[in-house]
Amino acid sequence: MASYPDNLHYTKDHEWIRVEGDTGTIGITDFAQEQLGDVVHVDLPRVGESFDAHAHFGEIESVKTFSELFTPVSGEILEINEALSDAPELVNSEPYGGGWMIKIKLANAGQVDSLLNASEYEDFVESQTEE
Amino acid sequence: MSNTQLKKTALNEVHRKQGGKMVDFGGWDMPVQYPAGTIAEHLAIRTGAGMFDVSHMGEIAIKGPQALDLVQHLTCNDASKLADQQIQYTGLMTPNGCFVDDILVHRFAADHYFLCVNASNSDKDFDWIKSNAANFDAEVTNLSANYSQLAIQGPRALEVMQPLTDVDLSAIKYYWFTTGHVDGVPAIIARTGYTGEDGVEIYFDPSESERLWNKIIEAGQPQGLIPCGLASRNTLRLEAKMALYGHEIDDTTTVLEADLAWCCKLAKGDFIGRDRLVQQKETGLTRKLIGFEVADKGIARDGYPAFIGDQQVGHVTSGSPAPFLKKNIGLAYLPIEHTAIGTKFEIDVRGRRLAAEVVPTPFYKRSRQ
């Protein structure tokens, strides 16, 4: 079963963000990596680029499909996870750890409050998978 | 889950229990991958062994004094060349020389043939065969519900299976079969597969499915055998450039366009679709299936358009990362003048043009002893 740590915020696009001071670390959720299957490539933006909340910031390719990546909040890219270019499988094995994608300087910390908490996200995932 | 309308193999519950991720595959509820994941499953079969449940595949028997005549009438390969216990890949042809389906014909005897057909086509194939059998003294029976089918594939697949069976597997040549037992269960044991690797495909009574599945998983541990899903089956067959119905071949692609002339024997005598194929051979092809590698980083997927300059000239029929070769590969139909090895073209990947090049196929070929 997929896990959703309590200390993260989540989006309905299946990204997570961990806020430390005015920096947010962003990746995709355990549920998202399970849906994609084996990740083979992650296309990330450049450091210094700025994005609005919910903007498209990159793309992730697995063996059988691809998905677009969206920022949960507005801000400027401080760092990207260079390790993913050689080891994209980290997104599968450590979605909340070594599989992080970007670090962003929060333009508006208040935006985090509108995101889902772990139990809300879990409920959302269940509502998506039950038909 | 609203899966009640999907068809299930006898192993459906086993797949769920063992962590198979289930998807709708042509109306069947099938595992697309197991917990190991598609890449690990693909590599297990290239280097050790893996097993697929392919019980969704259909089986059709043709029996009677004119069984061979009917098979010859329906298919493009020459079934008269088959000996007892030999198997042939062939096309079930439309009158246009295109594919009703691609199938395996197993000859049990001169008056008894056993066809393995694609799951999603099995009812259509059966109806097609029946509707063309009226003038032949032959009985056509749909046996699809009577068989489970497992594919045990990989360089160590025979090593896994030999202790479980009373037949000498090494004595079965590639594309031959025999009948015997697997762990006491009567089975058709065929040295075939859809992975480009050595291995066997076994057909047996569905009631024994769970026991045999678990027995083979257990027996295969020393050889690294793992259960595999349909996603790795697809990447394996693509590396080996084996056609997939609905992608490379369908009722709009001729056997010659699909680069399958090796299984099209125009000299064998008349068959459905032959006139069109003779004509196409004389006038020459206007398009052909080619294999390509993507030069740029990026993955060309099924359906993406292929361009030369500003002109769309074709589309990708299957495209994927190749887990063993570690390249991004695919198959596409291109105009015949652009099919030479080394030809450069472009593929539109969601608005971005990627450079691609026509390369020799199969992309992967196993070394044979």
Image: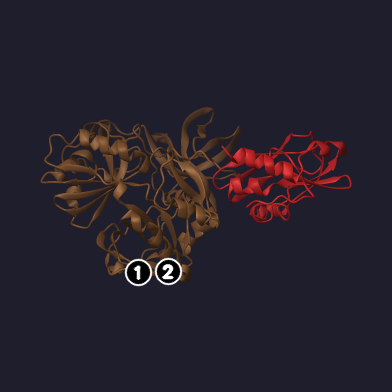
Chain colours: A red, B brown
Q: Residue at x 24, y 34 (%)?
A: B273
Q: Residue at x 68, y 41 (%)?
A: A123
Q: Residue at x 46, y 60 (%)?
A: B46
The amino acid type, in three-letter code, at marker 1 is Leu
Find disc 1 in the rendering and name its residue.
B164
- Image position of B188 with respect to B117: above or below: below
Q: Looking at the image, which is closer to me, A5 or B112?
A: A5
Quarter residue B171 falls in: bottom left
Answer few, some or many: residues within 10 Å of disc 1's Cα (few below 14, many 20 plus, some between 14 and 19). Answer: some
The amino acid type, in three-letter code, at marker 2 is Ala
Residue A5: give x, y in percent of width and height: 74, 51
- Image position of A70 with respect to B174: above or below: above
Measure the C-alpha gap from mark 2 to mark 1: 8 Å
Answer few, some or many: residues within 10 Å of disc 2's Cα (few below 14, many 20 plus, some between 14 and 19). Answer: some
Q: Looking at the image, which is closer to me, A58 or B221?
A: B221
Find disc 2 in the rendering and name its residue.
B219
What's the chain of the residue with tag 2?
B
A114 left or right of B321 in image: right
Q: Are marks 2 and 1 in contact (CB under 8 Å)?
A: yes
What's the chain of the residue with tag 1?
B
Quarter residue B335 falls in: top left
Quarter residue B109 falls in: bottom left
Q: Does residue B231 appear anywhere in the picture?
A: no
